[in-house]
Structure formats: structure tokens, C-alpha cells
Image: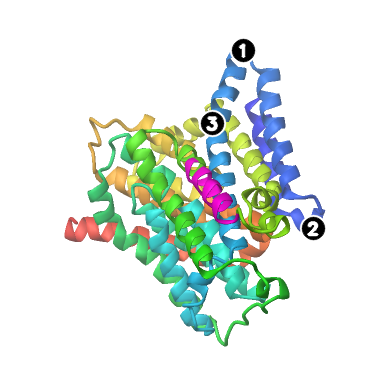
Amino acid sequence: MITLMIILFVIGYAAIAFEHPIKINKSASALLTGVLCWTVYIMMGEDKHIISEQLTEHLGELSGILFFLMGAMTIVELIDAHDGFDVITSRIKTTDKRKLLWIICLITFFLSAVLDNLTTAIVMVSLLRKLIDKKEDRLLFIGMVVIAANAGGAWSPIGDVTTTMLWIGGQVTAQNIMLKLFIPSIVCLIVPLLILSIKLKGKVSRPEITETAIVNPTSQFERNVVFFLGIGALVFVPVFKTITHLPPFMGVLFGLGILWVVTEIIHSQKDDEDKDTLSVVHALRKIDVPSILFFLGILIAISSLQATGILASLAHYMNDTIGDLNIIVPAIGLLSAIVDNVPLVAASIGMYDLAAYPTDSYLWEFLAYCAGTGGSILIIGSAAGVAAMGMEKIDFIWYLKKIAWLAVLGYAAGAICYIGLEYFFHL
């Protein structure tokens, strides 16, 4: 059974990677992979009732991610419909590729620490559509946004789900993780930024202002209200979570509900035709449902590997055969580029005791960095990458050729930086 599930997962993964040559949409491949893995598990398992309960439990967790994604995408689409991103794009005057790359990546890095890497990726991809017309240039920038979002999320207790898991579980404290991981995380971004800056030349072309944009029936006041309320709703999510202890998707849905009421009120006097294009209902029609289904398929497939204990067994095997944390933890980070970092970190938490590795110990800090940034190496290795892939139809192989090597260099540089700071300066 285990062998068959692994074979199915590998085949499905290959189908996603070679989406363009085989001409089958990656969402279809992901859904089939997820369903088939669970089908094999329940058909060949002994207790079908327990397996069914496992699926229900995993689906409960996954649905939170999907509703979060839908809510965040809808908020971003609503801001876009109101030309709210003009608040930022009007202030970014440069068209020089190098300058623009640094501006976008640094904004992404710090925004990701405040929001999270998934939401930040959605916001920044939407922003880049307003700044860069040529798709080839835009994709390169989006690839760097994925690296920046994951690097920015790693050093913040609310920036990446794995860091949040370690924070909530008591493995790390908020102040210490920010202090210890900020320098390695910024190094993880700066190294690929410097390399790409040497290669980049020329200027980007801005998208032409369409006739629709010219006659957009929104005032400056309405654009500002929707932009700041929308971004505020996303920033409020971690605060909502801390106060209520409810999952993040509840905070996003709360923010969307507030935004829905406000837009209904401010557009109540407009014509039905104008009002329709500025409504939440219209934004919901525009969100990319195939990318959400792709997300669902990937997460279901990985959850089947978690449910059968394959990932936990892999983690234990690495611990028993390697033993050295300076090899094991970076290997977990590399593995998180292939499978989801959440179950890998969950397995690590179960494998290493707080009695042996107390709060804020070397293991937990290094794990937070590696699990948070390792996913950048492949486009489907992180939530930020999957969201960007769905929104801009990024080809897996293109990312592998153009971005992966930069992500590897940044990941390695940050890891070496963390080890060096710890061993030589005891920071």
C-alpha cells in the first residue's frame, strides 16, 4: 500500500511539473493525485472507519487554508476593482529593473512578516500586474516575490505557518525568533537579489491605461477607503487570531464581511451597472477557482502521506541514520520544497522532546528558518509559490530553471549565516 501511494504521488507530481508538455491542467492532476492516494489508503487499509475519520480531520484543517485563500483573493480582487493599488503604484515611479526589483522584494519581505507569506504573495502578484506589462519580466519578479515572502515569513511568529506552529507549541518565543532569524532571513533574500541584479538590465514597460480604467466610477476617497480597509483587514488577521484563538480564515472572513458592508454602503447611490463591477459578488466571480482546487488537490495528496505515517517515518529515519542537526534540519527544509512543510515540522515536534531541546534552543530556531525558506526552491513547495503559480499560470519547469538555483543559493547562505552566528558569536 505504502509503495503504491508513493508511486501515485510521484506520478502526480511529475504530471504537475510537466503540465505544458502533456497538456493537462495541473489542477486536474493534483485533484486526481489527492483522491487516488486516499482511495488506495482506504481500500487497502484495515479500519476504513478510522481512515474516513482521518480524512475528515485533515479536510477540516485544509478547508481553513482554502477559505483563507478565497477570502484573501476576494479582498485583493475588490481592491483591484477599485484601482486601490494605485495608492502604491503611483508612488513607485522607477521603471529601472534593478531598482524596482529591490523595492518590490523589500516590501514583500517586511509585509510578509506582518501578514503572512500566502497573503503577501497574493497582494504582490496583483501589484506587479499594475507595474509590469511584459509577462517574462513579471514572472521573474514574481519568482523573487516567492523567495522574499518565504524569507520574510520565517523570522516572524505570524509570518509563516510553521513558525506559528513552533510559537504556539512553545518551542520558540516571539522576541527570540525575530532576533535570531532576522539576519539569516535577510541574507536568504539578499544573496539571490544581488545575483539577479547583476544579470538584470534595462527598464520595465508599464501596462497601458485601458479605457475601462479611465472611466472607472470610483472617487479617490472610495479607492483609499477600500485599499486601506482591505489591507487593514488582512493585517488584522493575526491580531484577531491572538485575541479570539480562532483560526486565521475566520479573521479573513470577518474582514471580508466588514468590507462587503462598507462597499455596499458607499456605492448604494450608484447605477446598478457601476455598482455590480465594484461589488464583492463580482470579485468572487473573478477569483481563480482552478488555483484553489489545485491547492486542495496538493494538500489532500500530502495529507495522505501524513496520515499513513510516511512523513513521520522519513523524519525518524533521517534522525537515526544522520544524527547531526546541521544536516538533518537543512535536509528537512529541502524536503519541504517537495512536500508540505507543515506535516514535516509537525513530525519534528513529535520526534524531539522539549525536555531535550528546550524553548528557543538551536534546533527549533534552525528548523523555523529551514522549513520556512526551503519551500522557495520549487514553485509548489510553499503556499506563496502555489498561490503565485495559480494566479499567473507559472510553469513548474520555468521556475525550476530560472528561480530554483537562486532560491538554493539564498537558502544555503542563510543557513550558513545562522550556523556561523550561533557557533562563533553565540547570538
Residue 255, image x, y percentages: 48, 46
The magenta region covers 254-267
Of badges 1 and 2, nearer the viewer stands 1
**Where is residue 386 shown, x and y percent of the image?**
59, 51
Which of the two residues, 383 or 81, is positioned nearer the viewer here? Answer: 81
The residue that mark 2 highlights is 21
Q: Earlier in the sequence, mark 2 or mark 3?
A: 2
- At numbered mark 3, what does the secondary structure look like: helix, strand or loop? helix
Q: Which quadrant of the structure image shows residue 8?
A: top right
Residue 109, quarter of the rendered image:
bottom left
Determine contact: label 1, label 2, CB under 8 Å.
no
Q: Is residue 16 visible?
A: yes
Q: Are marks 1 and 3 in contact (CB under 8 Å)?
A: no
**Residue 306's mark?**
3
Residue 258 within the magenta-colored segment of the rendering: yes
- Residue type beneath disc 2: Pro
Looking at the rendering, in which quadrant would you find the C terminus? bottom left
Residue extending farthest to the bottom is 202
Residue mark closest to the camera, 1 vs 3: 1
Residue 378 visible here: no
Q: Is residue 12 magenta?
A: no
Whole-angstrom CA distance, mark 1 to mark 3, is 17 Å
